[in-house]
Amino acid sequence: MQIIINVSDFLFALPVKVVEKVAAPEIVTTNTEGTFLGQIRINLMTAEEFFKIRINKNNPKKSLILLTVRQELPIAILADSVYGFVREGDLNCFNRGELLKMYGFEYVSKICLYKNRLLFFVNESSIEKRVTELLWE
Amino acid sequence: MGVSRYLKLRINSIYYLCPEENIQKVVTFKEEEIHDSPYGPDWLTHLVVYEKEVIPLLTLKDDKKKSNSKTKLAVIIKKILFFVAIEVDEVLNFVEIKNDVIDMSLNVPIKFAKRALDYNGVECYVLDIDALFSVKE
């Protein structure tokens, strides 16, 4: 099962199992020591930053949903909304493999057409890779 | 010396020649079939689905000259197993040009073109197919 999030009008699908919870961003507190979700210190960033996507449009409403990636991946990403859920097997995938990697789709493992919109899949290993990158930055 | 066939295309007011061997199809895309791209170099702003694959839609058109048309004319260009769509204003005719004319033509610093030549009094640019399939310009 994949959760679909809306990020600057792009749809990204990520495995439900990497997501700890979905919540409103108001529950995040910041103090001099950083950003906290309850008692847990987290890295908070926008989904655009997390997925390193190009922002085509001005998107002033930032964002209403906080998606926390699981405990061993201490990061929370701000998306615009949760678009829905989908089973990967229910979609026809349109892979461009090598070509899309060449064009810089480094975290996208496959692309599907979903309700006449492109759905960019990010798999678990890509998320782990990205979190590791961020932790070492 | 042999002769090669090229398809003559017009983009804005510039005429391009595309080698026949790289032409897959001339198609039109409806507005709703054209998707923004979250990744890629600056010139790769759109993606389209062609034959169940997501491929880049390249546009060389000036922002000021972009049409408001609901459909866009495009030529699908292939290189081995990869495809790229390029938005054009007009598809003209096939022309035959001697290979030595191409070989002796001038290198030009034009985006996605590598050589310029005079064909029946009209300046034409030979599309650089390799550049279309890479991130170089």
Image (cartoon, coloured by chain):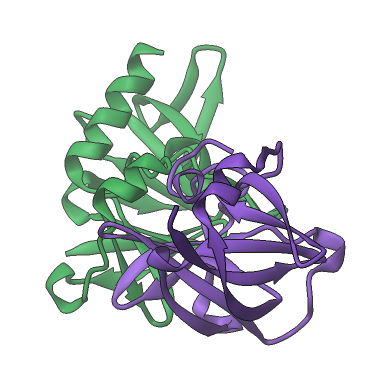
The residue lying at 50 percent from left, 44 percent from top is B131
Quarter location, residue B95: bottom right
Residue B25 appears at what percent x and percent y? Answer: 43, 79
The residue lying at 42 percent from left, 40 percent from top is A104
Which residue is more in the foreground, A70 or A51?
Answer: A51
For this orientation, the residue located farthest to the right is: B64
Which residue is more in the foreground, B73 or B13?
Answer: B13
Which residue is more in the foreground, B2 or B77?
Answer: B2
- The relative height of residue B86 versus residue A60 in the rendered view (above or below) is below
The residue lying at 60 percent from left, 53 percent from top is B126
Residue B136 appears at what percent x and percent y? Answer: 53, 36
Where, quadrant-wise, is the C terminus of chain B in this rendering?
Answer: top right
The letter of the purple chain is B
For this orientation, the residue located farthest to the left is: A89
Residue A110 appears at what percent x and percent y? Answer: 26, 57
Residue A131 appears at what percent x and percent y? Answer: 31, 28
Quarter location, residue A137: top left
Which residue is more in the foreground, A127 or A98?
Answer: A98
Does B80 sit left or right of A28 as displayed?
left
Find chain A in the image and tell me its colour. green
